[in-house]
Amino acid sequence: QFVLTQTPSVSGAPGQRVTISCTGTFSNLGAGQGVHWYQQVPGAAPKLLIYGNSHRPSGVPDRFSGSKSGTSASLTITGLQADDEADYYCQSYDTSLTGSVFGGGTKLTVL
Amino acid sequence: QIQLMQSGAEKKQPGASVKVSCKTSGYTFTSYGLAWVRQAPGRGLEWMAWISAFNGKTDYAQTVQGRVTVSTDTSTSTGYMELRSLRSDDTALYFCARSSHYYDHREGFDHWGQGTLVTVSS
């Protein structure tokens, strides 16, 4: 259903590191399109965490990092904190659909 | 500071139309674009449309093309999204978001409105 595929859920204990994956296809990530990551706390608007595969907007802690290789991308969160518990979405541009596309989202639970 | 303030919640009957506004402030409106993203209850994010505030260029998702129109009023730095022939599965929280460039929306959305709940029910 979603053009970009994300694992539905991931969990980790405070202080640990977690990685959230995003898998695309030849027409988006594989076509060299950048991937962007958002954090959404329930009831709030999404917040841009990473843009252009690995760049952090000002104000985003360096605990959050992103990478991309081929048709896959990942968001890594180190030093997990309780308020990192949220939904995380990847987003890119699809050259076949000629539009932006989102992943289905990954729910992060901090144990 | 950069702000995107959306209009209030709407309740519509099936078949009707809805127009949501997004008033921006804190930046040069015509130097960026505006995207519209919706989120059905308990579901993920769905990109719907984008418009360049510089030249009015638009892109629409295939899932809503033909039913949605986005526009801007540069005199008031406001964007609009109109969705027609509403169905129950259009019930969602609708967000406007600023794109990082005026010429396309390939670089993500860096500031978001608070969302407007549109409920479609008879």
Image (cartoon, coloured by chain):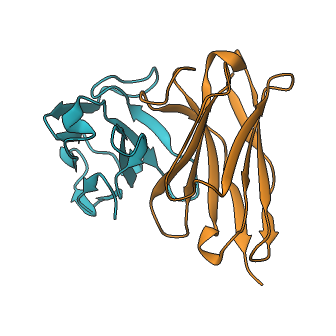
Chain colours: A cyan, B orange
Q: Residue at x 70, y 35 (%)?
A: B4
Whether residue A58 is visible, yes or no, is: yes
Q: Nearer the viewer, residue A65 or B106?
A: B106
Q: Residue at x 39, y 49 (%)?
A: A102
Whether residue A78 is visible, yes or no, is: no
Q: Nearer the viewer, residue B103 or A50?
A: B103
Left or right of residue A12: residue B48: right
In this rendering, is residue A37 above or below B54? below
Count of numbered circles on the image:
0
Q: Residue lying furthest left in this view?
A: A70
Residue B79 x/y as whole percent: 74, 36
Left or right of residue B29: residue B47: left
Residue B122 x/y as whole percent: 78, 84
Q: Residue at x 57, y 57 (%)?
A: B64
Left or right of residue A50: residue B100: right
- Give the image quarter of residue B77: top right
In this rendering, is residue B18 above or below A57? below
Q: Residue lying furthest right in this view?
A: B75
- Give the image quarter of residue A5: bottom left
Q: Which of B79 and B44 is in front in this view?
A: B79
In this rendering, is residue A44 above or below B55? below
Residue A23 x/y as whole percent: 20, 49
Q: Quadrant of the N terminus of chain B?
A: top right
Left or right of residue A56: residue A75: left
Q: Residue lying furthest bottom in this view?
A: B122
- Give the image quarter of residue A76: top left
Residue B33 x/y as whole percent: 61, 27
